[in-house]
């Protein structure tokens, strides 16, 4: 991409002004004329002009929020997986066309320029991307809300595939600076760690004093956020850690120079890196420090803002503030608020507790037991001693309530306690406190009520809610699939981007030949775009006329990428063995994208397996290019934006009961892919929306999975192994040296865990037990795909019936059931 000399085209006056604005930024900010500017400078200049426009709105919006003194939501989350912001911001400002025209006039394309922005990858997966979609919808719906998170120096690692294996590189997303943030050093606060806590009495009140505590400075960086076609500006506040002693000149003067530098390093390490574990907890000390850092700085800020406006009328706090805890990671906000109200604002326990129990709401995002956060008590006590004292008192009072409800039931007491078995339970801290608790799909909420949170549910049913996740249509169709967006605009008229239910008006065109052709042409063009990407990045030539079957999401055993690979192997084997099958076979391109947690060995081995199977199949001339297997490196938001537009089939094949909701499933549906999936998470509701003819459901239901999990089930597995020849053959290939020629050892662990199990329980995730059903369903898909008209109609129906999965609907539900915010006028 090279800058060309400025063309003279016909620009409107507004576009002319924008053009001058961009050129002016290049001149003034970089001291260059347009011809000398690098593409990165052009990107930065564009971003600055967008930021200026947002800031102008911000000044007004901020004033209105202040004057109205309306209730605010603080959405506390350790992850905000924002992706790139240039295009969404321009779209939300309703200026896409202007920027396109002006950049073209300057010799660039908006898309090329936008792709120079580093993804803000401050999240692992579903939970982080959900937070980003939520903040877009909140702002679009004019609801006053702040996202609060850490300003990680390094986001989720960059994945590089070397010899088929995942390797991890640091994600240096800030290397060219962050065009969207505004540092607010004047609003920095201090967070204290460790030390000794002393209590003493003064005027009949217990007071707290600290000694030897370590102080870290929290500096906020604000990213203003603009909603789609709305006046309100919200913000994402990112807290960065800085050494507090950097400013302590006395230490320098005393000659403690090296100690100060060391301390600076220790302090700043807190916001250095996002932990890359998804659905798996590692009790790392630094992670607990991160948690306290975010929570304490955010609460100091919230309470200060409140006090400025409302004085010390703390009982009004629940009318003005609601704090949402996004999974248990920010849970210690609860004892931290108790601490501030009691120790700093002199409230008594009862008064403080009454407020705290009206302010916090909690969402659970997973039932995986290894993801349920627990901290060793001694570590907790060492790092945040005062909060530990508060948790002890919370626990004492909680146990009285639990004893009254479940008298003498020691097992339940232990299960429900905040402190038990040497550990601090974050989920129980939330359950003991929050006025609202919700799951992220209907099925997931039912499982919470019936299973992991059952005992709490029985004590107070009304505060449990089911709120199904959603995605922002602005990013996940308008921005990533402009051609389809335009076709929908032309067909049902504009307005559906803010009123997603209107998409259902498309249903009547599902069998309309002219519409089908346009819809399919767009899908074909998107597949071509992805095929080009694959050729460029993987050096594999794939056929855009083959079925694009895509599974992209985090790599986890419960998501069952393994089942997908085994099935590909089975198809490959059959192609080689059965000429009639081969003659009828519809060519397929199987696409995977997935990051594995760096310490999750088995997940990483599955990545190697996918790549090795790809190597084997892609280079076997005997199958005449009928199957291609592609692993997309470094899967993330920006790559997802391409892939979701190009899928014919979306793989949503988790073991039923394990995927809380899924949101990738919704992105594919919206862009007209047909799902093959289990009755899990939001798939259940997709099935309800789109109807059984337009989705392929297979496999065990969650109750059936639960029953098998209780029974261990090795006889069933043995039986399947003995009777399903196609599956047995694929499994044996893992260990007979046919995948990586001659290597019989490499995938032994994968074979063993499926066939024999880790602790004598084989096939924990029901891969073998669901295989037959999965295989048959794929065969059905291949048959159906041949009837092009019928299949395109299914694809159209998926787009048409996806309105329910707009995060605008989700946010409206949260607001009605939990937050009760008033839209800003
Ligand atoms: C502390 C380690 C850790 C990190 C992240 C534990 C757990 C998590 C998340 C809760 C995992 C996660 O992202 N869960 C996903 O949340 C999505 C949004 O609700 C759901 O759609 C997915 O089904 C769920 O897996």
Image (cartoon, rainbow, N blue to C red):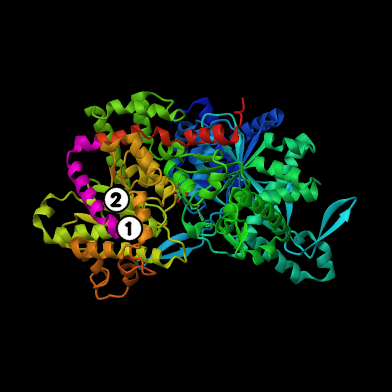
**For the residues bearing labels 1 and 2, Cβ distance under 8 angstroms:** yes
In the depicted view, which residue is nearer to us: 721 or 736?
721
- The relative height of residue 613 versus residue 79 in the rendered view (above or below) is below
Residue name at image x 35 percent, y 54 percent:
705
In the image, the segment drawn in magenta is: 768-792
In the depicted view, which residue is nearer to us: 509 or 83?
509
Residue 436 lies in what quarter of the image? top right
Residue indicated by mark 1 = 766
Q: Is mark 1 on a helix, strand or loop?
A: loop
Q: Is disc 2's CB within 8 Å of ligand 1?
A: no
Residue name at image x 70 percent, y 65 percent:
382
- The relative height of residue 423 versus residue 808 in the rendered view (above or below) is below
Residue 770 magenta-drawn? yes
Q: Where is residue 78 in the image (x, y as percent from the top left)?
A: 57, 52
- The relative height of residue 258 versus residue 611 in the rendered view (above or below) is below
Q: Position of residue 399 (x, y in %)?
A: 65, 54
Within 10 Å of the Cα at label 1, are there few (<14), some (14-19), or many (20+) other Cα atoms? many
Residue name at image x 83 percent, y 54 percent:
207
Residue indicated by mark 2 = 699
Q: Residue furthest front?
A: 408
Quarter of the image for the C terminus: give it. Answer: top right
Q: Where is residue 434 in the image (x, y as percent from the top left)?
A: 61, 44
Residue 762 lies in what quarter of the image? bottom left
Q: Give the spatial CA distance, label 1 vs label 2.
A: 9 Å
In the depicted view, which residue is nearer to us: 614 or 16?
614
């Amino acid at each position: 991409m090279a800058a060309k000399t400025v063309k003279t085209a016909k620009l409107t006056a507004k576009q002319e002004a924008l053009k001058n604005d961009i050129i002016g930024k290049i001149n003034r900010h970089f001291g260059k004329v347009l011809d000398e500017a690098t593409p990165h400078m052009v990107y930065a200049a564009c971003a600055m002009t967008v930021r200026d426009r947002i800031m102008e709105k911000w000044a007004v919006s901020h004033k209105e929020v202040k004057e109205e003194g309306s209730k605010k939501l603080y959405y506390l989350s350790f992850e905000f997986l924002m992706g790139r912001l240039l295009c969404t911001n321009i779209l939300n400002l309703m200026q896409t066309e202007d920027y396109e025209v002006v950049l073209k006039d300057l010799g660039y394309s908006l898309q090329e320029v936008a792709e120079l922005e580093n993804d803000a990858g401050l999240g692992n997966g579903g939970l982080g991307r959900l937070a980003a979609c939520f903040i877009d919808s909140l702002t679009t719906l004019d609801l006053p809300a702040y996202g609060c998170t850490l300003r990680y120096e390094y986001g989720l690692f960059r994945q590089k595939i070397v010899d088929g294996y995942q390797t991890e590189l640091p994600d240096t997303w800030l290397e060219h600076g962050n065009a969207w943030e505004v540092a607010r050093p004047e609003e920095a606060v201090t967070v204290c760690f460790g030390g000794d806590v002393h209590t003493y009495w003064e005027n009949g009140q217990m007071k707290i004093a600290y000694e030897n505590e370590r102080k870290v400075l929290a500096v906020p960086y604000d990213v203003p956020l603009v909603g789609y076609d709305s006046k309100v500006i919200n913000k994402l506040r990112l807290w960065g850690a800085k050494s507090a002693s950097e400013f302590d000149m006395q230490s320098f003067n005393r000659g403690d120079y090296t100690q100060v530098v060391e301390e600076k390093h220790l302090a700043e390490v807190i916001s250095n890196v996002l932990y890359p574990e998804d659905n798996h907890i590692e009790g790392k000390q630094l992670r607990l420090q991160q948690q306290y850092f975010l929570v304490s700085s955010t609460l100091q800020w919230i309470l200060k803002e409140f006090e400025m406006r409302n004085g010390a009328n703390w009982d009004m706090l629940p009318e003005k503030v609601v704090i949402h805890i996004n999974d248990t990671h920010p849970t210690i906000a609860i004892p931290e608020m108790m601490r501030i109200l009691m120790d700093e604002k002199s409230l008594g326990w009862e008064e403080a507790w009454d407020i705290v129990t009206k302010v916090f709401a909690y969402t659970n995002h997973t039932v995986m037991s290894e993801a349920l956060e627990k901290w060793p008590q001694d570590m907790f006590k060492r790092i945040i001693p005062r909060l530990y004292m508060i948790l002890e008192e919370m626990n004492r009072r909680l146990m009285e309530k639990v004893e009254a409800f479940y008298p003498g039931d020691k097992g339940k007491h232990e299960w429900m306690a905040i402190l038990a078995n040497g550990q601090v339970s974050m989920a129980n801290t939330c359950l003991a406190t929050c006025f609202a608790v919700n799951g992220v799909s209907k099925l997931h909420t039912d499982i919470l009520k019936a299973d992991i949170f059952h005992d709490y549910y029985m004590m107070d049913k009304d505060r449990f809610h089911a709120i199904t996740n959603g995605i922002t249509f602005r990013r996940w169709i308008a921005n990533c699939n402009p051609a389809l967006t335009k076709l929908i605009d032309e067909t049902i008229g504009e307005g559906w981007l803010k009123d997603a239910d209107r998409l259902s008006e498309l249903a009547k065109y599902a069998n309309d030949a002219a519409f089908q052709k346009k819809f399919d042409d767009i899908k074909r063009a998107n597949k071509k775009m992805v095929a080009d990407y694959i050729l460029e990045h993987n050096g594999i030539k794939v056929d855009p006329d083959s079925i694009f079957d895509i599974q992209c999401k985090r790599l986890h055993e419960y998501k069952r990428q393994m089942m997908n690979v085994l099935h590909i192997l089975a198809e490959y084997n059959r192609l080689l063995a059965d000429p009639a099958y081969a003659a009828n076979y519809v060519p397929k391109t199987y696409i995977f994208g997935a990051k594995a947690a760096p310490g999750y060995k088995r997940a990483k081995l599955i990545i190697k397996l996918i790549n090795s199977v790809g190597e084997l199949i892609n280079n076997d001339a005997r199958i005449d290019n009928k199957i291609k297997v592609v692993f997309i490196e470094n899967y993330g938001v920006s790559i997802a934006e391409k892939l979701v537009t190009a899928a014919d089939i979306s793989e949503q094949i988790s073991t039923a009961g394990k995927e809380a909701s899924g949101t990738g499933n919704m992105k594919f549906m919206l862009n007209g892919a047909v799902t093959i999936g289990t009755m899990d998470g939001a798939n259940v509701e997709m099935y309800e929306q789109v109807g059984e003819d337009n989705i392929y459901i297979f496999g065990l239901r969650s109750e059936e999975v639960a029953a098998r999990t209780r029974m261990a089930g090795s006889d069933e597995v043995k039986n399947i192994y003995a009777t399903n020849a196609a599956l047995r053959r694929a499994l044996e290939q893992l260990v007979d040296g046919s995948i990586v020629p001659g290597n019989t050892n490499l995938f032994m662990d994968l074979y063993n865990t499926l066939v024999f199990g880790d602790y004598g329980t084989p096939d924990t995730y029901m891969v073998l037990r669901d295989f037959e059903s999965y295989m048959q369903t794929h065969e059905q898909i291949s048959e159906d795909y041949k009837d092009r008209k019928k299949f395109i109609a299914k694809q159209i129906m998926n787009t048409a019936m996806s309105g329910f999965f707009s995060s605008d609907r989700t946010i409206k539900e949260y607001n009605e059931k939990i937050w009760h915010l008033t839209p800003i006028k």
